[in-house]
Image (cartoon, rainbow, N blue to C red):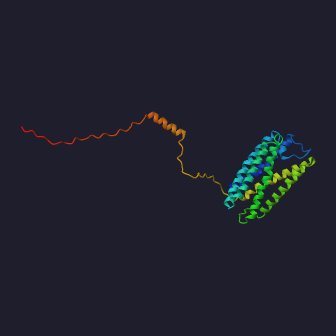
Amino acid sequence: MWGHLSLLPIFLALWAVAGTWTVFSLAVLNQTVNLTERFPYISACGSEPPQSCLFSQVLNVGAAVAAWIFILRYHQLRDWGVRRGFNQLILWAGLLSAVGTSVVGNFQQKHLRPVHLTGSFFAFAVGVLYFWLQLLLFHLRKDLPRPGPPWLGLLRLLLCSTCTVLMVVMTVLHRWRWLRSASAGCEWTVAMLLFTLVGLLAFDFSLLDSCTLCLRAAPGPVSPPPVSPSSLQEQLSQETCLGPSPAVQPEETKENPTPGPTTWEAG
């Protein structure tokens, strides 16, 4: 039975697909892009307001959810016995892809082109690398769990291969102005395939029921908790109202006189 964590990849895939095509529709309605001239890149659709505002929000939310998914995947692979070094490599590839996605949404191509292109590289190239690394991991570790239908691994291989080929074709076609519509079509296809790859993680998360955040204390002696300012102030006010407590005087001991010899007088 699938838990609620399985909905995270599905939500991200649907959110990203619906958000990017909504931005495209707004750009066409506002005549920011002209489809009669050429088919636009994703970034061109989100360069002008008001769709640029929506574009930023869609990618920022998507990047945050993606980072959370990648962290959950890291802990899942760790519990399956994956080596720490390779697992961290997969995690950092996913996190860099999420950061690149956020950079694409916040630094528009029209204003900061170098920063935008750097973010696009991390979002697309490093994002595909994230899934290639997992395919390599499952190829080397035959003992790892493989939830989902038996054709899932083959589908992921096909999607990753298609993304890699299309990214190369997109880069080559972009060199000629009259082929940039085809290059933009390759970009849109790569984006949709990446969203599909993320959504397929729902099969892996079907083995998860819930997650718990645990805090681990640092090694060393445990120091007493600091006094909060409110409790310290309350303590000082009580001492002011009651006044200083009287000092306890030591109890004086009275010495009993030692009776001396009784003297009798003769009369």
- Comparing 6 with 226, the one in front is 226
Locate residue 227 relative to residue 168 in the image: left or right. Answer: left
| Residue 66 locus on image (x, y percent) | 73, 51
Residue at 85% from the left image edge and 50% from the top image edge: 187
Judged left or right of residue 229, residue 30 is right
Q: Is the N terminus in the top left, top right, bottom left or bottom right quadrant?
A: bottom right
Q: Quadrant of the C terminus?
A: top left
Residue found at the far left of this picture: 267
The spot of residue 185 in percent (x, y) is 87, 50
Is there any visible trace of residue 189 in the rendered image? yes
Q: Position of residue 228 (x, y in %)?
A: 54, 41
Q: Is residue 146 above or below residue 44?
A: below
Q: Quadrant of residue 144?
A: bottom right
Q: Is residue 195 visible?
A: no
Q: Residue furthest right?
A: 178
Q: Where does the image place residue 131, in percent across and percent down from the top left? A: 77, 57
- The mark total stands at 0
